[in-house]
Image (cartoon, coloured by chain):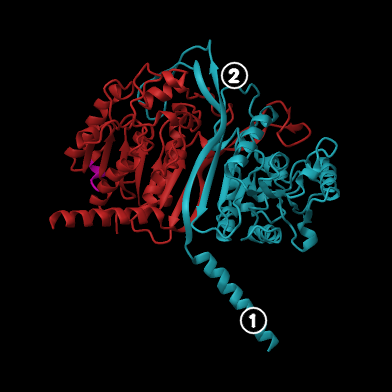
Chain colours: A red, B cyan
Amino acid sequence: VRNLKTSLIALAAMACMMSAQAEPLQVGDIGGFHIGGRRVTLSGLPVREVQIPGVPFPMRIDPNGDYVVEQMYVHYVKLAAPRARYPLLMLHGGGMTGVTWETTPDGRPGWQMYFLRRGYDVYVADAVERGRSGFAPPQVWTQEPIFPGAKGTWELGRVGPPGSYDSDGAKRTAFGDFPPEAFDQLMKQRVPSWGAANARAAMQAFDQLVQRICPCAVIAHSSNGPLAMRMALNAPDKVKALVVIEPSGALDPQAENAAKLRGVPHLWLWGDNLANDPVQSKVMPGSVRWRDALVQAGVTADWVELPRVGIAGNSHVMMMDSNSDQVAGVVQAWLERNGAMK
Amino acid sequence: VRNLKTSLIALAAMACMMSAQAEPLQVGDIGGFHIGGRRVTLSGLPVREVQIPGVPFPMRIDPNGDYVVEQMYVHYVKLAAPRARYPLLMLHGGGMTGVTWETTPDGRPGWQMYFLRRGYDVYVADAVERGRSGFAPPQVWTQEPIFPGAKGTWELGRVGPPGSYDSDGAKRTAFGDFPPEAFDQLMKQRVPSWGAANARAAMQAFDQLVQRICPCAVIAHSSNGPLAMRMALNAPDKVKALVVIEPSGALDPQAENAAKLRGVPHLWLWGDNLANDPVQSKVMPGSVRWRDALVQAGVTADWVELPRVGIAGNSHVMMMDSNSDQVAGVVQAWLERNGAMK
C-alpha cells in the first residue's frame, strides 16, 4: 500500500508538472521601456556621407548636436494574476544581455519562463553599454570596446577547463553540464562592452530602475552581482531578496554598513569545477568576507555550492545548463522560504 | 429607435474593446534565439589589460582567436491558440531595434501587443548590427558606426518639420501625432549602425529567418522595407503578405521578376507631412515604379496614404504615434482581407 501511495503521489506530481508546462500562461502585459540616460552635445565634428542599408543614396550625416546616452532597456512580462508577492528583476553577466534569461542556447525555456510559470512578473534588463540599451559615441565613451571571443567564453563560462577550447568543435573538452553543441549559440548571445569607465552610469540606471519597479527580488549573474549588492544597499526597503549567481566580486565590509541589509536576505549560488576559475580564484575571499559581514550583522546570507547539495557539474552559465530547471528550483525554494510567495 | 440602436452598438463595441484589453493573453511560449552569423578568426592583435565593471582586478584580454559575428536576435511570443493563419514578423527601421514594436515611447501598448491581442504569434527581430544581435570587431566591420542624433531623429521621424528641432524642448515645433513629450524616450530607443557594408549580412540572416519561422506575414518599417521586399522575392512561398511602412526604397523592376510575387499581397502605408521629407522626396518615384510593376504582374499591391483615408498627421514612426492603434487597425483590416485569419 505504501508503494502504491508513493507511486500515486509521484504520478500526481508528474501530472501537475506536465500541466504546468502545457497550460497557457495568463499574461496581463508584455512590453519594455528605457530608463536613465543623459543628454550630451557634440560639436566640431566633420559632416560625413554614409550609405545606409535600404536607403538607395548616400545620406549626409552631421554628427554634431544632441544625443541621449547611458539609458538602460528593460523588458517585462506581467502576469494577469501573479502568485508571487513581488516581481523578479533579472540581471545578466559581463558581455551578455537579457537574452541570458530567455530560451537556453539548446532551445529549452530559460529562467524567464520558469519563474513566469511559478507566478512571478519578470523584468529583464540589458545593462547600460549593451543590447537594446545602445552605446554612446567614442567622444563620450573614450575607451575601446572589448569583444568577447570564443576561447574566453569557453573558459570563463566553464564550458570546459582552461586550455580546452579548440577552433575545431570535435577537439574541445567540455565539462558537460553546458551542452557543448550549443556553444555557437551561446557565442551569438555575446556582445561587446566598454569596461569600468561606465560602471557609474550602469549603477545610476539600476538605482533608478529599483525606484521605479520595486519592491522586487533581484537575481544577478556574474559581473552584475556586485552591482546588484549595491542596489540592495542603496534601497534596502525596495530590494526584498537578492540572489547572486557566481558574482565576480562583493562589497567591502570596511566601507559599507552591512546592518542596513537586515531585511534583505541574500543567496550566493555556485556551480562546479571552480578550483581553477581565473576570476573566482581571485575574488572568492572578498565574497566570503562580505557574506560573513552580513551574517554578523544579522542578515540572512545563504551560501549554496551546488555540488555540496548533490547537484554536480554546473558551469558559470548555470541558467543555460542542461539542468537549468533544477538550478532554478533551488532559487525558487529559497525565495519561497524567504517569503516571496503570497 | 435608430439612435438607441446606434448607441447600443457603440456600447457593445466599447465593451468588447475594453474586455479585449482587460482579459489575460493566453500565451504558449515567450522566448528568443539568434540566427545566422559566421565565425571569424583574428590574429596579430596586442593583448590588453582592461577593467570590467563588477570585476575588482584588471582582466588580461587576448583579442586574438575566434569570434562569431553577424548573427541576428529574434524575440517571439507564441499564443496558446492563435486565431491567425500564420505569425507576424516585425522588422524595425534604421538606427532602431525591435523595441520599435513594444510599449510606445509614451507608455501605451505597441503593435506587438496589438497584434498578439488580435490572435497572431509575433516575432520581432533586432536586425544584424544592433541591439541584442551585437556587433563585430572593427577588424571585421571596418566602417565607423553612425550614431543617431536628436535633430536627425526629430526630422527623419517627422516628429516636426525640417529645421524645427531645438535643444530646448519648449522651443520645438511638433506636428503633433507623435507625442513631443515622449521624444526623449524615442531617443533612448535609438542605436548606432554601420551602414551598407553589412546589408548582405542582414539580408542573409533575414532569408534564414524566413526559412525557419515562415509561412508568415512581414511588417517592415523604413530602411528594412526594401530588405523585406527582397525577403518576399527570395521566398514567395513563405512570405504570405508584406506590409511596408514608409519604406526607404524599393526593388528595381528592370532587375527583378515581379511576377514571382503573384501570391504575395503587398501593402504600402504612408503617413502625413511627407512633402519635404528628405528621404521620401528622393525615393518615392522608385517605390511607385515597383508598385506599378507588381500591379502589372498581377500582384495585389495596395497603396494607402493615411491622410487620404481620413487619418491625418501621422509621423514616420506611426506605430508609436498617439493613434498607433488606429493605424494598426488599418493594417489588421488589410491582413484580414488578404486571408490572414483562420
Horizontal side of A303 relative to B43 (left or right) equals left
Dot 1 falls on a residue whose secondary structure is: helix
* Residue linked to disc 2: B139
* Dot label at residue B228: none
Give x and y (percent) for residue B183: 62, 48
* Residue linked to disc 1: B7
Q: Work out which residue is located at the far left of the displayed protein and give it.
A: A2
Quick check: B22 above or below A101?
A: below
Mark 1 vs mark 2, CA separation in Å: 66 Å
Check if residue A340 falls in the magenta segment: no
Report the chain holding disc 2. B
Q: Nearer the viewer, residue B231 or A253?
A: B231
Horizontal side of B232 relative to B106 (left or right) equals right
The quadrant the N terminus of chain B occupies is bottom right
* Residue drawn at the location 57% of the way across and 29% of the way down: B37
* Residue drawn at the location 50% of the way across and 11% of the way down: B46
Sequence-earlier tag: 1 or 2: 1
Residue A261 showing in the rendered view:
yes
* Image: magenta residue range: A259-263
Quick check: A177 above or below A33?
A: above
The quadrant the C terminus of chain B occupies is bottom right
Residue A254 showing in the rendered view:
no
Check if residue A262 falls in the magenta segment: yes
Three-letter amino acid code at disc 2?
Gln
Magenta residues: mostly which secondary structure? helix
Give x and y (percent) for residue B19: 52, 69
